[in-house]
Amino acid sequence: MPDIDLNALGAAAGPLQTWVLPALLGLGLASATGLRTFLPLLMLALAAKFELFGVRLIDQMDWLVSWPAIAALATATVAEFAGDKIPAVDHALNAVGYVTRPVAGAVAAGSVFWAVDPTAAAVAGIIVGAPAALAFNAAQTGARVGSTATTGGLGNPVVSLIEDVLAVLTVIVAFLAPIVVPVLLIVLAIVVFRLARRLRDGRTTRPA
């Protein structure tokens, strides 16, 4: 593969395609990793593999679109999906997620800064991805704790399924219309916050 002058490529693409749209796409992907570690990465890999939605990755992330990587991500996604439906296991996944999800968010966000050099892409991924993933993982913690306290864990699979849907929708919107990702994330944060508050309020008002 011939060497590519990333500076010239970035100048030709312009700041919108070089920084703004990748940042918004990365923000959406990272926020989804705050709910599911592997699902957004799997969707990103498939989109890049089949050249869907105009998704492009930096050259250093070409391994992500290999079939072994996709198979590994698919296996991890199924395992996380199933494990998250089991009370107690879901809390363990959420606790581990305080480490794994910011990393996944940084990787997902950094990989879409295709028009800049790898160091800049990595820094941008950390700045954009890690805090977003951490924030949504923390919000998930509140919802799970409230659900466990209110339902004894029986309602956790329902909460988990809602999170699955939200993660998928967030990634799809990020692919189709990254410009609306900030609005989507505000709505998503409100939904998760209200869910956690409702579950917490249900705990405090439950008769003894």
Image (spheres, rainbow, N blue to C red):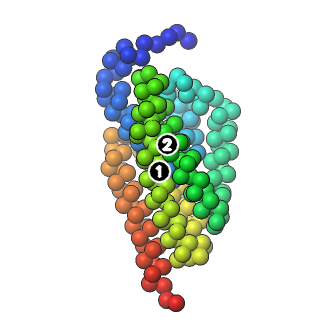
Category of crowding for the residue at label 2, using alpha-carbon neighbours closer than 10 angstroms: few (below 14), some (14–19), many (at least 20)? many
Q: Please name the residue that numbered disc 2 is placed on.
A: 105
Q: Amino acid at mark 1?
A: Leu
Q: Amino acid at mark 2?
A: Gly
Distance between the alpha carbons at the discs numbered 1 and 2: 8 Å
* Secondary structure under the numbered disc 1 in the rendered image: helix
Where is residue 99 shown, x and y percent of the image? 55, 48
* Labelled disc at residue 149: none
Can the viewer see residue 192?
Answer: yes
Snapshot quadrant of residue 25:
top left
Residue pictured at 52% horizontal, 90% vertical: 208
Where is residue 153 shown, x and y percent of the image? 60, 72
Q: Front-most of 104 and 20?
A: 104
The first of marks 1 and 2 along the sequence is: 2
Residue pictured at 52% horizontal, 9% vertical: 2
What is the total number of numbered labels drawn onto the structure image? 2
Q: Front-most of 43 and 94?
A: 94
Residue at the limit of the structure toward the bottom, as seen here: 208
Q: Please name the residue that numbered disc 1 is placed on.
A: 134
Q: Does the CB distance between marks 1 and 2 fall below 8 Å?
A: yes
Category of crowding for the residue at label 1, using alpha-carbon neighbours closer than 10 angstroms: few (below 14), some (14–19), many (at least 20)? many
* Secondary structure under the numbered disc 2 in the rendered image: helix
Where is residue 157 shown, x and y percent of the image? 59, 65
Residue pictured at 56% horizontal, 52% vertical: 97
Residue pictured at 33% horizontal, 33% vertical: 20
**Above or below: residue 1 compared with residue 18:** above
Label 1 or label 2, whichever lies nearer to me, is 1
**Above or below: residue 8 compared with residue 30:** above
Residue at the limit of the structure toward the top, as seen here: 2
Can the viewer see residue 54?
Answer: no
Where is residue 93 shown, x and y percent of the image? 61, 56
